[in-house]
Amino acid sequence: MPVYLDKLNPAQQIAVTHQDSPLLIIAGPGTGKTHTLLNRIVYLIENQNVLPESILALTFTRRAAHEMLKRLENILEKKLLKTGIFIGTIHAFGLELLLTEFLQKKNISFSIYTENDSIIILKEIVKNKGLKNINIRNLQKEISLMKNQIEETNKPDPLFMEIYNCYEEYLKKSHAMDFDDIIIKAVELLEDSSMLLKYKKRFSHILIDEFQDINHAQYKLIKSLALGEKNITAIGDPDQAIYAFRGANVEIFLQFKKDFPTYREAYLETNYRSSGTILKASCEVIEKSRLRIKKNIHTELDKGVNIEIMNFTSEKQEAEMIAKRIEQMIGGASFFSHDSGWSNNERCENKSFADFAILYRLQAEGNIFEEVFQRHGIPYQRVMTKSEKKSLQEKRAQYLLRIIQNSYDFAAEIELKDMGFQLTGQINLISEAYKKLNYTEITKDLFPSLSSSLVDEVVNLLFKIDIYKDAEDIEEDTYEKMAEKVTLITLHGAKGLEFPVVFIAGCEEGIIPYLKENEENELEEERRLFYVGMTRAIPACLYNLFISFKKKKKKIYFPLCR
DNA sequence: TTGGTCGGGATTTTT
DNA sequence: TCCCGACCAA
């Protein structure tokens, strides 16, 4: 038996070494999910002689995929991995399938539409049809949800279907796919039996992390690859399911059991992250859930200190006080030693900014922390999606690049128009200019029908595109684990991370739990989200979890203005 | 067609 | 608060 197995607990050992039947692992927070999955991969390669290229490991976020690859590289030799283990998000996998089997083969260039692009298209449709009073954001969400179910169960109203079909037409005309299409088209690809056989052969071992966040379409993709196979491993925690709004459904666990009747089940219930106090409190929260798969999480750690609950009257005060608290704990030793003799506790010393995280429900809540931290000189990193951080210039360059690569891209054309570019009829010229970029001077004669200031900007952007293209590749994630900065992050974003000191901000009626007027059944999900937040804290210091409450407001308001 | 003002609604994320 | 759509005036 390999040495590294000794370091695992019995349940983890089973999860790592199990063979010859599908495996479903139910694992609580802090129980070593990723660690177990990683060790299973190592075990497969080193002890079962499974080729790396036969392994397909799917995660839910790019960050998780990246993290897993990095950790695996530390254990195994890099070159072993380079030979082709696939670790990535389901979307990345779907895209990979489509690229290798279809798009690259036929040399088709295409665009991937973000939610924003979909909205642009839908606006156009609604406008052309002369419809009014339609909430386009909701429309986009409904279309996305429908796509994620794949099989349409209920018949939606005819107008909706009309728009839906029209939307699909536009995507086709634009040579574009939205995120959901990536999965759907990949599923369709595997409906071809020879194609399916090819990939079944290639991937003998499939592992899925964060199984609770898989939606129906994604499950279908996995299932088609794994059905009838014995080497599928799914690991997840139904209590941490927080992506129902994207069509994820915990029923998937039951579905798995139905589809893979020879499955074995393993439970990881030993928590290595939470103090006794935090564990107890978080369990009390999650036990209120209806329809829950019961688990018996227990921790190896001490009881720890009490969770601190702070009360404020405004979010400004909340941010100020949290900033002060962080300053106290950074300058920790001297401050505490006078007061309470805690300085003997060596775990509390050397606290650095990197140890802190502020968790909140809405991105907008991060603004006030940025503001206050700037004033206090507290270094921070705010975790946001890339698109939110892009400057207008970058966006322009990006759209321009898109239209150069795929001249049918209608959403890009509209966006550019909105940004002041009238490019109709110029796209080919611009494409040409872009190709020549490295060899010749671009002159204004190339764009006879553009005004000279526009030409200047287009030329400027053409040069910039290359820079952004490179930046795109380098910029992996906005979150740096080791940075000497306080992390500002949403509760959703914090899943899978852990911090020695965690503040959950904005616990206030309507925000946590987030409530929309007419939808109460999302309360269950909000509870799980809060549970995720609570279990992010590693008790490396006397204080590790702060929950700050604000005075109840009568109405839901936004964005937390006073 | 464009421009200006008024009012209502505003989550969380995947290349 | 801030952004977008609706509506109205030119």
Image: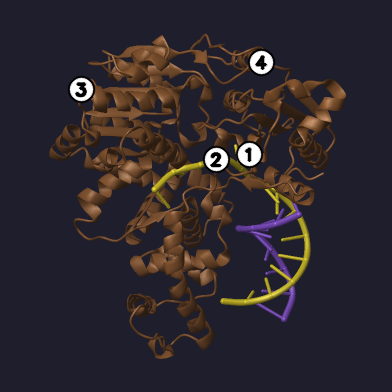
Chain colours: A brown, B yellow, C purple
Q: Quadrant of residue A552?
A: top right
Q: Crowding at label 3, few (<14), some or many (≥20) Cα neighbours within 10 Å?
A: some
Element under disc 2: loop
- In this view, the mark in front (3 or 4): 4
Residue at 36% x, 32% y is A75
Element under disc 3: loop
Residue A14, relative to residue A516: is it above or below? above
Q: Which is more N-terminal, label 1 or label 4?
A: 4
Q: Which is more N-terminal, label 4 or label 3?
A: 3
- In this view, the mark in front (4 or 1): 1
Residue at 23% x, 20% y is A230
- Chain designation of label 4: A
Element under disc 1: helix
Residue linked to disc 4: A281
Q: Which is more N-terminal, label 3 or label 1?
A: 3
Residue linked to disc 2: A481
Q: Return the residue nearer the eye: A125 or A192.
A: A192
Q: Crowding at label 4, few (<14), some or many (≥20) Cα neighbours within 10 Å?
A: some
Measuring from the top left, give residue A510's x and y in whole percent.
Answer: 71, 33
Distance from label 2 to label 4 (Cα)?
27 Å
Q: Amino acid at mark 4?
A: Ala
- Chain designation of label 3: A
Q: Return the residue nearer the eye: A165 or A40.
A: A40
Does A43 sit left or right of A210 as displayed?
A: left
